[in-house]
Amino acid sequence: MRSKTDQIRNAWAAGDKIAALRIASKFFDLSEETMTFQRGYQAHINPAFFKQIGKDPEALTATAISALAAKFKLPEG
């Protein structure tokens, strides 16, 4: 079985940043990074809810993807 880190890197390399974010959002720690991943993924799958509470779902998702790239040293592009 591959580690979550390997799965994230493989999804990212395949061009599927949302899949990489989905995997990262399921980490069990309560760090600020993991919370960012969770918020970003939830904003992606539930944009209407985040708009209702006054948040920009696209910005939350973009922030989470940038944080993911920084944490795992993934190429942004």
Image (spheres, grey):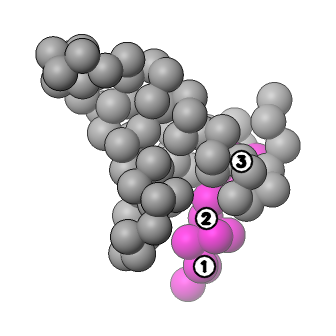
Residue 55 image point, x, y percent:
31, 21
Q: Amino acid at mark 3?
A: Ala
Is residue 22 visible in the rendered image? The answer is no
Query: Residue placed farthest to the bottom in the image?
Result: 1
Say above or below: 15 vs 29.
Answer: above
Residue flagged by tag 1: what amino acid is it? Arg
Q: Regarding mark 3 in the picture, which secondary structure is present there? A: helix
Residue 2, percent from left and from top: 60, 79
Residue sitting at x 81%, y 29%: 77
Q: Which residue is mark 2?
A: 7
Res 52 quadrant in image: top left
Numbered circle sitting on residue 2:
1
Q: Is residue 12 left or right of residue 63?
A: right
Whether pointer 1 and pointer 2 mark residues with C-beta atoms closer than 8 Å, the reply is yes
Task: Decide: few, some or many residues near mark 3? Use Cα within 10 Å; few <14, some 14-19, many ≥20.
Answer: many
3D distance between C-alphas at marks 3 and 2 = 14 Å
Most frequent secondary structure within the magenta stretch: helix
What secondary structure is marked by label 2? Answer: helix
Q: Nearer the viewer, mark 1 or mark 3?
A: 3
Q: Earlier in the sequence, mark 3 or mark 2?
A: 2
Residue at the disc numbered 3:
69
Q: Quick check: is 8 in the magenta stretch?
A: yes
The image shows residue 52, relative to residue 46, as above or below, that is: above
Question: What stretch of residues is rendered in magenta?
Answer: 1-13
Dot 1 surroundings within 10 Å: few (below 14), some, or many (20 or more)? few
Q: Nearer the viewer, mark 3 or mark 2?
A: 3
Residues tagged 1 and 3 counted as in contact (Cβ below 8 A)? no
> Label 2 is placed on what type of residue?
Gln
Residue 32 against residue 60 in the figure, above or below: below
Dot 1 or dot 3: first in sequence order is 1
Residue 17 in the image: x percent, y percent? 60, 39
